[in-house]
Image: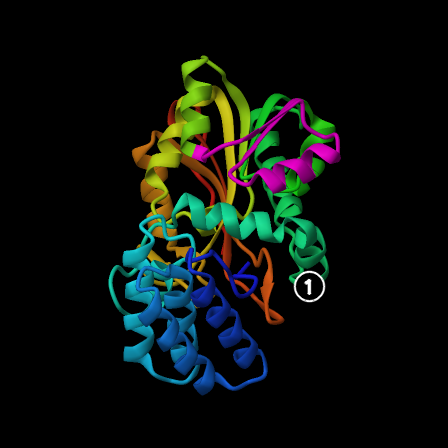
Amino acid sequence: MTDTGPLFVSSGDLVADRRYKWALDNAARGDFAAAADILDQTVELAPGFATAWFALGAIRDRLGDRNGAIAGFEKARAADPEDYHGARLQLARLGAGETAPAMTQSYVRRLFDQYAGRYDTALIEHLAYRGPALLRDAVEAVLPAAGRPMRFAAMLDLGCGTGLAGAAFRPCVARLVGVDLSPAMIERAAAKGLYDRLAAADLLDALAGEAANAARYQLVIAADVFVYISDLAPVTAAVARILTSDGLFAFTVETHAGAGVQLLPTLRYAHGEAYVRDVLREAGLAVTHLVKAPVRSEKGVPVDSLIVVAQPSTAMQAPASSAA
């Protein structure tokens, strides 16, 4: 998922706000040069107007002015340390600053709050999303070797969104818990009546809370969630602390042929296979299943992805399997 359109956070100056909206009107008509001129006047009037700086960076980028775009995004980042607009990601895309900066909570929350109303339709009908089905298939594939049925006492759905993955696993789970950073997504999930408990919270905070309460899960899943997290080590270690001794951790990531983590042009992260294996091993988890398959499409093109199932290393009874 990429950003959903122009944003607006007031500068506190009515004249500057009107100029900003006037600039967007010009941009909507395709007159980007005029929009840039008006935004130049806007930020001169209100130098701390992060929204206008971000829009100026985006329009300069559209005009092919890379240096001007970088300057605009840098001003937006400086004016808004919470990076509500995602200026750090745009700078990384342009090759300035960090190569794979972490997304801020305010950026991710805003992104998904905006998107919640059309999330299911967009993913299923337009992006050919099949992450939950692929994760269920992957979990089912590892159970026969351990002589286990497709039945779990408790499952934690990380980044549960509107409940697409919850719906796929609900028939085989006695107790289903979901957590998501976006309150709007949680509201949509609650309306489906799938979950026994839902929480709007940061993933690491939620996992720390589960560990503090001595909660243990036989299954933890993260469907199309880690594409918004650059460093997987903290969340993987936190998941390991709440898994039962025979618990499973199933997730998807977008991937690339190189090493480490890359920020894609879609402003989503891709994680290399070796990186994924390393962070799991460091968390005391071993890969029991790893396949490459497209979880979704982008502009009609399948996106390279990994579907992974891991479990505590002490529970391993056989060598890990991997398929291309």
Residue most extreme to the left = 97
Side of 145 relative to 55 (left or right): right
Q: Which sits in the foreground, 111 or 130?
A: 111
Residue at position x 46%, y 80% in the image: 35
Please tell me how crowded label 1 is: few (under 14), some (14-19), or many (20+) other residues with Cα within 10 Å: some
Colour option used: rainbow
Residue at position x 34%, y 64% in the image: 46
Quarter assignment of residue 286? top left
Side of 211 relative to 297 (left or right): left
Q: Is residue 98 above or below residue 199?
A: below
Image x and y of residue 11, in percent:
41, 58
Side of 68 relative to 124 (left or right): left
> Pointer 1: what residue?
126
Task: Answer yes or no: is residue 316 visible.
Answer: no
Q: Secondary structure at mark 1?
A: helix
- Residue type at mark 1 is His
Q: Give, as a single range, the part of the protein colored magenta.
A: 175-203
Q: Is residue 258 above or below residue 321?
A: below
Image x and y of residue 3, in percent:
52, 61
Image x and y of residue 26, in percent:
54, 81
Q: Which sits in the foreground, 280 or 44?
A: 44
